[in-house]
Amino acid sequence: MTTRKLGFSALLKAIYKRLMDTPLSCNDETLLFYNHVPENTAYPYHVIGKLMGVPSAEFTTRDTAGEDNAFQIDSWVDRTSGLGDKACADMQNAIIQRLTASALSITGYNSIHFYLDYSNIMLDPDHPELFLRHGLLRFRQGMSPI
């Protein structure tokens, strides 16, 4: 019988530790990360969330159940950081470089694989007057309990 344990909490802690232990900056701006954005937060900011997970037959052993998790980082960048996609793309690149520099240390888990799964930048249609860019990064993390 395998032990099933949901690793979202441990994964979020590892992500926040990697991104926030040493402040991450880009184009002279310190990047701010949230799971729940405080009211009236100024742009730019980045939201970590939209966790998704499925059991992974590939990483499951006789004793433990592996999982394949995904999480998303949404970047919200307005024209105060520069017009066009460049400011958002630069910030996304800084996030990618920081997260993929080495394997995440996830308490209680072995890190099997970690990679960028998808990225996108679009003009937010809900606020055209702000020229607000919405960047999306989706990462995948394979992990199994220790």
Image (cartoon, grey):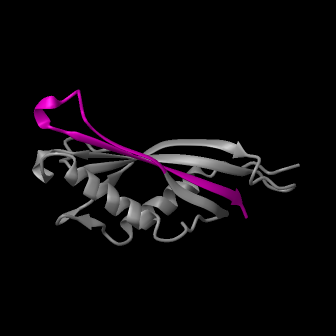
Nearest to the observer: residue 83 or residue 33: 83
- Left/right of residue 137 with respect to residue 5 in the rendered view: left
The magenta region covers 117-146
Q: Residue 135 lies in magenta, yes or no?
A: yes
User: In terms of image quadrants, where is residue 55?
Assistant: top right
Q: Residue 10 lies in magenta, yes or no?
A: no
- Left/right of residue 122 with respect to residue 20 in the rendered view: left
Count every numbered label the image shows and give the total: 0
- Residue drawn where x is 22% and y is 27% of the image: 126
Image coords of residue 100 (percent x, y): 47, 65
Nearest to the observer: residue 68 or residue 21: 68
Q: In which quarter of the image is the C terminus?
A: bottom right
**Position of 13 relative to 41 (above/below):** below
**Position of 31 relative to 80 (above/below):** below
Q: Is residue 11 visible?
A: yes
Image coords of residue 24 (percent x, y): 30, 67
**Position of 39 relative to 63 (above/below):** above
User: In terms of image quadrants, where is residue 94?
Assistant: bottom left
Image coords of residue 40 (percent x, y): 19, 42
- Left/right of residue 123 with respect to residue 80 in the rendered view: right
- Residue drawn where x is 63% and y is 63% of the image: 111
Q: Is the magenta stretch mostly helix, strand or loop?
A: strand
Q: Can residue 32 be seen in this view?
A: no
Nearest to the observer: residue 34 or residue 74: 74
Image coords of residue 123 (percent x, y): 23, 36
- Residue drawn where x is 17% and y is 66% of the image: 28
